[in-house]
Amino acid sequence: MDYSAYLPQLKFLAPEIFLLCVAAASMMTHLFARRNRHRRSGMVALAGLAAAIPVLLVTPAGGEIYSGTLNVDAMSMYLKLVFIIAAIITVALSFRFFSVEGFETGELYYLVIFSVIGMMFTVCAVDLITFYISFETFAIISYILAGIFKKELRSAEAGIKYFILGVLSSAIMLLGMALIFGITGETGFARIAAALPAAEPAVALSGMVLMLIGLFFKIALVPFHMWTPDVYEGTPTPLVVLLSTAPKAAAIGVMVRIMPLVFARFEAQWIVIFEFIAIATMFWGNIAALVQDNIKRMMGYSSIAHAGYMMIGLAAAGRTGGMAVLFYLLVYFFMNATAFALILLVQKGRGFGERIADLRGMARHAPLAASCVAVALLSLTGIPPTAGFIGKYYLLLAAMEKEMYLLAAAGALNSVISLFYYFKIGRAMFMEEQAGAHVFERTGPVTIVIAGSALFLLAAGIIPSRLTEYVWALIK
Amino acid sequence: MDILGIPVLSFITYLPLAGILAILFVPRERPRAVKIIANVTALLELCATLYLLAGFNVQAEGMQFIERAEWIPRVDAQYLLGIDGISLLLILLTSLLTLLATLSSWEAITERIKEYYIFMLLLETGMIGVFVSLDLVLFYVFWEVMLVPMYFLIGVWGGERKLYAAIKFFLYTLFGSVMMLIGILVLYFHYHTFDLMAMTESGSFLASTMQAWVFFAFFLGFAIKVPMFPFHTWLPDAHVEAPTAGSVILAGVLLKMGTYGFLRFSLPLFPEASRSFMVPMVVLALISIVYGALVSLMQKDMKKLIAYSSVSHMGFVMLGIFALTPMALKGAVLQMLNHGISTGALFLIVGVLYERRHTRLIAEFGGLSARMPVYAAIFLVITMSSIGLPGLNGFIGEFMILMGTFTVNWMWAAIAATGIVLGAGYMLWLYQRVMFGRIQNSANNDIADLNRREIATFIPLVLLAFVIGIYPKPFLDVMDKPVERIVRIVNPEFHEKKNSVTAAEAGPVKGEAHGGAR
């Protein structure tokens, strides 16, 4: 084997290496800074993450590197960008949250970066072992992040719950990978794909299904979604922005990559599975969200439903479906970030108001923020002229292209169901009077995040062609 | 044709947005400035649409003022605008009613004034957008965009049960819309374009079964909007709870979007399904006519009465559309205008009383004509226009619909005619109970007559009622070409059949058609 090419190939991993240095710097700051070490460690992390974006943008797409274990293609670059943006927003929202809650913690910031690095490798991985290691890297960190708010009982519960179920699903996934390896004798995705047609179908199919279960768990698809509302409720709000978006994006990115490549032989089977899961997930998520009073739980169920929408694109396997999913991923991130940032606008006593009732009268006190949140709610529902509509429209388009009428109708119907609960939030903000003495925060990163997201959602909803062309080019 | 270098249709679509932008910069403490900007914007909009009318070529076939640009080339969605006679009339109606609604809100709206006018103007952009878009995706976007400001207008400035009414309105219409979206996608995969003109010119249609399904999907979207029995249940709630201006727009323009959708999309794109579903559609229309009228008779609340009368009147429009004859179709289009004028005016009339007394119960009033002579006169004219008294607008429309329907099936016309009788009943009874007799309720002793601003809001509507009633020709001329075109597609045998029917029967019908239309 020729190892001489390995060193130059490092340049394709520049963003990951850079972020590793940032995480180390943040950690050192946390350990050795004299004053204000928590906050400073966060500042270092924030600056480093922001600087990682240009680094990522100048990094060339190198294709398969390191003997075919990683594939640094355009699609992975796109997903990496999503992860970094998610991390930036998470860190930015964390500062005030943890100081208001009186629980400053510096390790949070570099853990976020580590988990992002794990996800960045996951979406490049084209080899079972690389894939599993990077997958576990971000999975384990997300268990820690969920439970990081140690003095809060709910957070500890969330961490433990997420951990136990997460480890279980990882074990199931590992079993699937073992079956695939056992029957093909290969770890590289491309080689597995070549060997799979000759393999015993029952074993190969079981391997595929078990692997999918691990991914479904991370995306929180019905029936592997049970942990979601509890974990989101218990996890500190800024971190939910990360946990509810980035791991889903990573797992969906992996599916976009491996399903047509590795499991092309079982396309008919996995399309049926995806279709069924998509329908079940959309309905379950939306119907369960109807009865929630707690915004975080509601958004937990809403995020389940949105994962279901994205499954429409995967079930409608093909270029349009892939484009729709990648488009929706980014849009979904901004919608979700706004919805969770919304909670950080309401300061109630020492903590934050998480109930919908706490939002009453917000439009009077913070009209700009309320309007921006309204844009995000419209987008979540899928009403034009927002990016959420375009995203959903692409998903339906993909399903209709494959003549999956039932799937498309279910997707469309769910957008009507979801209107009901998203507008409970809108109603509280715009149409009800304030009850109780709490303040609506108007300054700081929260407003910037909300306003920026709303701006993006409107811009990408009115002029979606550039983003569309961009994601279209990512799918082969 | 351009205005200030902007193509005219884009200009009229986005002019209200410019008004919104101006309002955003006005501080909250200066509500008067906000009101002035909003009214001026609505007035400019009306002027712009009149300018559009001036440039419109009545003789031309097909769409005019076409604007075409790329929007999302990857999925073939275009920015495609254009109008024909039908859309032109509805655009004029929209800009007029929006101006009147804005003007009527001057004193009625006292809370959150800035937001109110922003939503009002946003609504106008949405409505105009619906009438000018010829690309189905673009059409859908405007169709949905319009729901949001309406939701807020009802939900924030509405009556007691406003929250319930607002979400009900939104849920119903959204449900219809998403089904239509699925239908739009089916069309796309048949025609490989969203361009409505290209679809109708291609001469090909969906296969029968699929056509029926897609017809049904579009039907859900449009019938809920109209609203047709049994999809009408959102309407009374929305109307009763909405502020006056909201009701005016809702009845005057939003309901027309449903019937407009049938004319613009359902008939030309699904001719076969339209023909085969003709009877069920007509039956639903007839039920709407009679049922709406009967329920109106029973109402104690004026607004609810007018809301149910809308169900009845829109049933007439639906009957005219699905009779599939040129005469009935023209009557339907004209009746769309008439309903906008008379029902819009009726809601303003109720609004005047509500502003003074904060109640809409008929039993609270009586004998008002003595205190409010000008009001009484205007109310009377509008009542007559709504009933369909000859010489006023309602008569022409209803007459043409009945005539056009009669040639297809006399039974339908006969049943529909009972709706007119009932209509006269509930409207006159309403007028009698509110205006005549002695003043029983002492609260009405000092009730003030209309002020100048209020009179100004009624004048254009009263004038229009007379103009259409006495000289409808220009209005019928404008819609002549598009209606002929629709009939050619949806009912191609009509012209052949007309010649083969015995002269005794066809003669007078044809004569009337020419008498009315030319």
Image: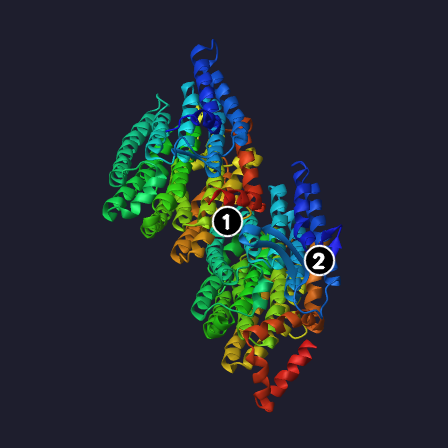
First in sequence, mark 2 or 1: give its number: 2
Q: What percent of the width, then of the height, locates residue A207?
A: 27, 42
Q: Is residue A421 above or below residue B77?
A: above
Q: Chain of mark 1?
A: B
Q: What percent of the width, then of the height, locates residue B371?
A: 66, 59
Q: Chain of mark 2?
A: B
Q: Specify the quadrant of the image occupied by residue B374.
A: bottom right
Could you classify mark 2 by the number of other residues whose Cα lies within 10 Å: few (under 14), some (14-19), or many (20 or more)?
many
Q: Is residue B436 above or below residue B390?
A: above
Any part of residue A290 in sight:
no
**What amino acid is labelled 1 in the image?**
Lys
Any part of residue B142 in sight:
yes
Q: Is residue B327 above or below residue A412?
A: below
Of the 4 image quadrants, the one containing the N terminus of chain B is bottom right
Residue at the far front: name it. Answer: A1
The residue positioned 75% from the left and 50% from the top of the image is B5
Q: Is residue B200 above or below residue B414?
A: above
Of the 4 image quadrants, the one containing the C terminus of chain B is bottom right
* Spatial CA span between label 2 and label 1: 33 Å
Under circle 1, the secondary element is helix
The residue positioned 59% from the left and 54% from the top of the image is B78
Under circle 2, the secondary element is helix
Residue at the far top: name it. Answer: A34
Q: Nearer the viewer, residue B407 or B232?
A: B407
The image's mark for residue B381 is none
**What amino acid is labelled 2 in the image?**
Thr
Same chain letter for marks 2 and 1:
yes
Q: Nearer the viewer, residue A321 or B96?
A: A321
Q: Disc 2 designates what residue?
A: B49
Q: Disc 1 designates what residue?
A: B162
Left or right of B158, for residue B98: right
